[in-house]
Image (spheres, helix red, strand yellow):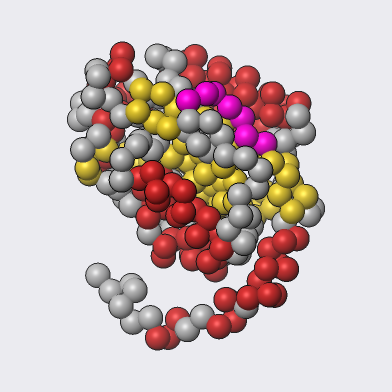
Amino acid sequence: MSIVRAAITQVAWTGDKESMIVRHEELAREAAAQGAQIIGFQELFYGPYFGAVQDQKYYEYVESVPGPTTERFQALARELNLVIVLPIYEVANEGEYYNTAAVIDADGTLLGTYRKHHIPHLPSFQEKFYFRPGNLGYPVFDTAVGRVGVYICYDRHFPEGWREFGLNNAQIVFNPSATKPGLSNRLWEIEQPAAAAANQYFVAASNRIGQEVDEFGPDAPHFYGSSYFVDPRGNFVGDIASKDKQEIVIRDLDLGAITAVRNDWQFYRDRRPESYTRTTQP
């Protein structure tokens, strides 16, 4: 399959988990009706972005994988013949929680999970209170539409992981995020295009929208959307989404471009891993 129609979403917090799940089921149906073959949701899609505070009550959002939400979307994927990248707050053991994305194939098979490796602890992003660092490596999943990886939000600031996906033969890497204005604005514009060009695959970057004031008060992060796709040369595929509106961004991705770009540049031929002695040192 060369041309893949891919979708990402940006959605504001509705105020409760069930309505968020229903909203994303509706968006998946809408995307499939428009011919989408794969869809990725935003970081921690069914809840608020609780990293804004430190409060044990948000541990209630954890689920096992497989579990009720993944099983619900497995059924939907099977019905719609749609690959789904599904960010989940995962419980692996009592008190052992991860910021995770499950990858569900178009026949409803749960292919596996990616766990966010790089966990921030900054003002408005107090994630070390909620998550352990990921420990499953940088898997690439063979889906019905191609080879898919997932890198979650803060991960994107670390180029080593992007390269791991390329070495693991990814064709599309999804980066579900919860990103607010400030230091991140310029990085949001350049990091994913730079990663796509340096590693020569497609990147799908999705961000939340809105300010969750009812949940966290006036100091809640204000997420700015601006979701987009980029190609293996680092070019935007179509327009960037709005900063404040719920949207499904749907784009046709020509996976054949990956081979063409790699033949032009030969980064994977010319890399010198034996010389990178500092990269993996603690």
Q: What range is drawn magenta here? A: 244-250
Left or right for 244, reference 107: left
Residue 108 seen by the camera: no
Left or right for 134, reference 11: left
The part of the image, by quadrant, that contains residue 212 is top left
In the image, residue 279 lies in the stretch drawn in magenta: no
Q: Nearer the viewer, residue 88 or 30?
A: 30
**Looking at the picture, how far across and down is residue 235, in whole percent?**
61, 55
**Looking at the picture, how far across and down is residue 171, in whole percent?**
64, 57
**Residue 29 to residue 114: above or below:** above
Query: For the point 46% across and 54% down, which residue is it?
Result: 190
Query: For the point 58% across and 58% down, which residue is it?
Result: 234
Query: For the point 52% across and 23% down, which residue is it?
Result: 245
**Looking at the picture, how far across and down is residue 183, in whole percent?**
30, 45
Query: For the point 38% across and 81% down, which residue is it?
Result: 276
Q: Nearer the viewer, residue 268 or 132?
A: 268
**Residue 141 to residue 12: above or below:** below
